[in-house]
Amino acid sequence: MSNTNKNNTTNVQDADYTPPKVWTNDKENGGKFASTNRPTAGARHKQTLPIGEAPLQLYSLNTPNGVKVNILLEELAEIGVKGAEYDAYQVDISAGDQFGSDFVAINPNSKIPALVDYSAVKDANKKDGEAVEIFESGAILLYLAEKFGKFVPMMQQGQARAECLSWVMWQVGSTPFLGGGFGHFYAYAPEPMEYPINRYTMETKRQLDVLDIHLKNSEYMCGNNEADYNIADIIIWAWYGQLVLGKLYDAAEFLQVDGYKNVQRWAQKIAERPAVKRAVNLSLKPIG
């Protein structure tokens, strides 16, 4: 990644920038998602989301955040869990589907994924009873894992549960530096800028090192046995596993991901799971 702009001149566009006393949205922000970015929340258009026959309705996209939920749902299907059947619908974030009225009613933050659990609703139109609406991928994973008692240590398991939740929350807190930080400035910004790329590259590599050190003596995030595979592996793999396998941002060489041998071994092992193979290429139905 070069530190020059499209005219091959040194990138000094911010050298003399001084923040104003009050920020105003008076310039095109550029980048891949410029057409949907605004400093305001809420619905922008009327929308009716489809509702299928399964008890769980997923509205998502096969991005890393979306893949997390795909994996858990497919892992539940793999072991034949009843009641975990789902319909999956595509929310096209480039087209602004996440700002439709029905989606915003489920997730006021307008980010994928979102899930509605209609298990308690009795009639065919899913109106007789209270549906459970969940947003944020970490919350969805924890909700589903606890609902079905799979892929998460339960409360009575003490340290095992604490370790799982600690790593789940590590991902939730760490990944914005990878996605919104490194990913944005390396892959999506309108032009390369040396300072933010260097800043977020350093943090991304530090996070990979955290994982590499931890996985030196552990097959999975929370242990060495198949039974120890849980939502901590799922939520972290969707971002960092795919990153070291060369699936994100075309940045594998830039980040020298081959140097994180323990993360590589862990990531490849999870990538070979049948449920994960299905999840990363999950077929999503159109919403309209």
Image (spheres, rainbow, N blue to C red):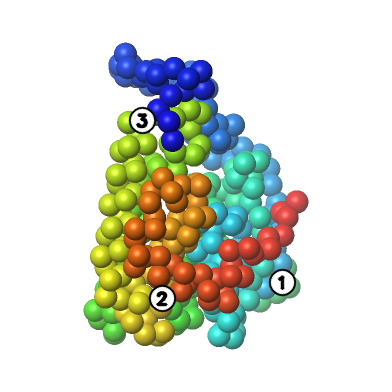
Residue contact at pointers 3 and 2, CB within 8 angstroms: no
From what the image shows, is residue 98 above or below residue 23? below
Q: Nearer the viewer, mark 2 or mark 1?
A: 2
Residue in the image at 55% along x and 71% along y: 276
**Does dot 1 land on a helix, a strand or a loop?**
loop
Q: Residue at x 50, y 51 (%)?
A: 248
Is residue 217 or residue 236 the one in the foreground? Answer: 217
Q: Identify the residue at image location x=45%, y=55%.
A: 243
Residue 194, numbered label: 3
Left-right relation of 20 to 282: left
- The residue at 57%/48% (across/down) is 104
Name the residue that disc number 2 marks. Answer: 230
Task: Say which label, 3 or 2, has the lower sequence index.
Answer: 3
The kind of residue tagged 2 is Asn
Residue 37 x, y percent position in the rendering: 53, 34
The percent position of residue 250, horizontal first and vertical second, equals 51, 47
Residue 46 sits in quarter: top right
Can residue 3 be seen?
Answer: yes
What separation in Å lies between label 2 and label 1 (alpha carbons)? 28 Å
How far across and down, in percent of the image, does residue 96 sit? 62, 41
Q: Is residue 161 visible?
A: no
Give the CA distance from mark 3 to mark 2. 38 Å
Q: Which residue is mark 1?
A: 53
